[in-house]
Image: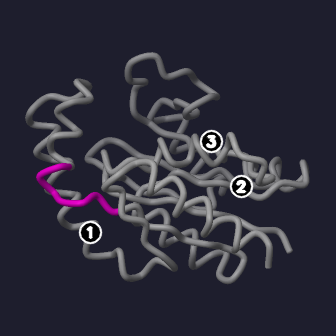
Amino acid sequence: MRKVVIFSAPSGAGKSTIVRHLLQQDLGLAFSISATSRRPRGDEQDGKEYYFLSEAAFQEQVDRGAFLEWEEVYPGCRYGTLRSEVERIWAEGKSVLFDIDVIGGLNLKKIFGRQALAVFIEPPSVEILYERLVGRGTDTPEKIRERIDKANYEMGFAGRFDTIVINDQLEDALVDAEQKVRKFLAV
């Protein structure tokens, strides 16, 4: 059976760190690169972290039906999962690994059902999440407040995922996530 593994979390909870760890293990996973209408941050590269599209190009892909799912995650900032990414990874004989926002993760779980393991990465607290976002140094105070408000909302969806990994101590979270993924892929 073709499988997908979905990692979702509020911004700053550590899902990208966990996903990078899983990609370094011998699990037969490949990363699904999402498309976004936002501009690159830091040293992000088109086709590596995301496919960076203009708003018009993003809308063109929506109109063509190129997305499995998409949404406006923040005002004026859309993200989506391209069908072509999933098809590419499955053609390589690998399982798809998603690093995606919470609502997008739930949408993918609806699409893939039992083919999917949906994992919610939970920060130990909103206060620690705030500290992590400030520590990144990539967002304005207003953007951090927006992310914290959204995180409070997203935490309410944790129970709709197949499993939760609490990222309090990173090493423990890495082990927990890897064990859960290995078990799912072995079935």
How far apart in space, not on screen, are marks 1 and 2 (Cα)?
Answer: 27 Å
User: Which residue in the protein does label 2 denote?
Assistant: 83
Q: Amino acid at mark 2?
A: Arg
Q: Secondary structure at mark 1?
A: helix
**Nearest the eye: 148 or 171:** 171
Q: Amino acid at mark 1?
A: Met
Quadrant location, the N terminus: bottom right
Q: What residue do we see at 10% from left, 45% from top?
A: 145
Could you tell which of marks 3 and 1 lies nearer the N-terminus?
A: 3
**Nearest the eye: 84 or 161:** 161
Could you tell which of marks 1 and 2 lies nearer the N-terminus?
A: 2
Give the answer, above or below, for where 117 lies relative to 144: below
Q: Position of residue 8 (x, y in %)?
A: 45, 60
Q: Secondary structure at mark 3?
A: loop
Q: Amino acid at mark 3?
A: Ile
The scheme the figure's colours follow is one colour
- Estimate how packed mark 1 is, as few (under 14), some (14 to 19) or many (20 or more) residues with alpha carbons within 10 Å: some
Question: Left or right: where does residue 106 sit relative to residue 182?
Answer: left
Quadrant location, the C terminus: bottom right
Bounds of the magenta span? Answer: 122-128
Q: Position of residue 25 (x, y in %)?
A: 71, 46
Q: Secondary structure at mark 2?
A: helix
Q: What residue do we see at 31% from left, 56% from top?
A: 168
Magenta stretch: includes residue 104: no
Depth check, mark 1 against mark 2: the one in front is 1
- Estimate how packed mark 2 is, as few (under 14), some (14 to 19) or many (20 or more) residues with alpha carbons within 10 Å: some
Give the answer, above or below, for where 33 lies relative to 139: below
**Nearest the eye: 5 or 26:** 26
How far apart in space, not on screen, are marks 2 and 3 (Cα)?
Answer: 11 Å
User: Which residue in the protein does label 1 denote?
Assistant: 155
User: Which residue in the protein does label 3 denote?
Assistant: 33
